[in-house]
Amino acid sequence: MRNKAASFVPLAAGLALAACATGERPAARPAVGPQPVEFSLRPVNFSDLPGWANADLAPALTAFKRQCASWSARAADAPLGAGARYGGTVGSWAAACAQAASVPPGAERAFFESAFIASAVEGPGDARLTGYYEPIVQASRWPVPGFTEPMLRKPSDMVTVDLGAFAEAYDNAELRGAPRTLTGKLYGDRVRPYPTRAEINAAPPSQAFGYIKPADLYNLQVQGSGRVRFNDGVEARAAYAAQNGYRWRSAIGAARDNGRLTDATWRGFRAYLDALTPDGARAALNEDPSYVFFQEEPIADPSAGPRGAANVNLTALGSLAVDPAFHPYGALLFVDAVYDGYAFQRLLVAQDTGGAIRRGPRRGDVFFGSGPEAGLAAERMNSQGVRFWTLMPRGAPIAALEDDADAG
């Protein structure tokens, strides 16, 4: 799956309030019926979006402007997202990006309504919204008691196979239905799956740039990145570099299921790991075959979050992790969910993904910011039956697929 410091303290202190767009109890939702099998987009009016009139759109505008800056380096005829089901080209978003640069505070709603049209998102898979954040952890440059787990750099022996490119080259429909990329290791002239977490722990394939506690390492790997404060006084970011290709399997759930953990919360799991020896903690984490590698980066802008999969710095309560097989990075997505019993209705920008998020077009993970307060807020987000809408620039094609005549 996939983070903020002092600059987000005022936000974190009021996260629960900021997350609730209306502050009202949500209306009763209709019973969940049969789930749609096909992905489609159905144009609607902005007045059809629940809570749109009162939603705080400022974080989404900040996130969108950061996204526009990244698009400026791409060709106008480049597709917005490789493998996504809609989005058009980068050039079709240029007018909206130019307009976004001069939107004054308080005019966000007028901007989005004038520059975009809204469409309801329908499709298979999970309809669920969760949250994530950027942890801030203590670290050591060298392994010492208490700081035993390495933050490993991306190994030089890791290779990525782009199945999407092979699908297009061979015009192979079966490959188009497979995951777009696979991560592996070259053994002679054969590519085989990359080693699991247990195998990596037994023989680390690359150098470490620091060492942290077992629970902190797993938290960084689940969140995707984090800020680390070294004992030499340096603060840096452990940024996502690569993942070994295995689907995430919760080590917390595994410890609960095998009877070793009675408190299956993150705090309970941390206490459980802290009480184990380093070897015992590694054995507990080895239940999850997924492993994330990091790279050390300076923190140039303390007000910005880590870079997501779109290579754009994330915005607290403005960025969303999505399934890129459906949504292109940069897509504007309005969500209708429930948070702490209240309506959570926000506009978010698709700028990240994760192993547990690639579950369909209505599965999302909201970035809550950095630090422990953001972590507590993110942990409370777990909303089922979420509804999604996407915003497309006026004049751009909105059909989910070119041959879907009724989708646009």
Image: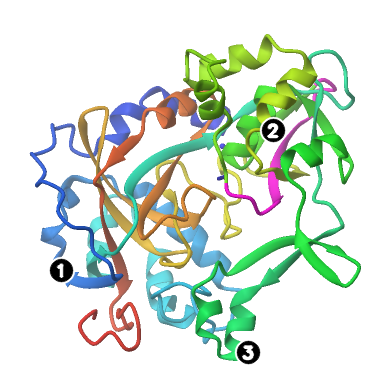
- Camera-near label (1 vs 3) is 3
Magenta highlight on residue 359: no
Quarter occupied by the N terminus: top right
Q: Which residue is painted at 70% across and 70% down in the image?
A: 161
Most distant residue in the top direction: 275
- The local secondary structure at tag 2 comes to loop
The residue to which callout 2 is attached is 286
Residue nearest the observer in this picture, 233 or 273: 273
Q: Quadrant of residue 274?
A: top right
The residue identified by callout 1 is 44
Of badges 3 and 2, nearer the viewer stands 2
Residue 313 in sight in this render: yes
In the image, is residue 270 above or below residue 108?
Answer: above
The stretch of residues the image draws in magenta is 231-247
Q: Is residue 192 above or below residue 284?
A: below
Q: Nearer the viewer, residue 384 or 196?
A: 196
Would residue 383 appear left or right of 170 to someone viewing this image? Answer: left
Residue 122: quadrant of the picture: bottom left
Residue with the mark numbered 3:
169
Amino acid bearing label 1 = Val
Q: Amino acid at mark 2?
A: Asn
Q: Quadrant of residue 260?
A: top right
Which of disc 3 and disc 1 is earlier in sequence?
A: 1
Q: Earlier in the sequence, mark 3 or mark 2?
A: 3
Q: Nearer the viewer, mark 1 or mark 2?
A: 2
Of 91 and 177, the residue lying toward us: 177
The image's mark for residue 78 is none
Q: Is residue 101 above or below residue 345?
A: below
Q: Tell me, yes or no, if residue 11 can be seen here.
A: no
Estimate the spatial distance between the alpha carbons at disc 1 and disc 3, rounded to whole Å. 37 Å
Q: Amino acid at mark 3?
A: Ala
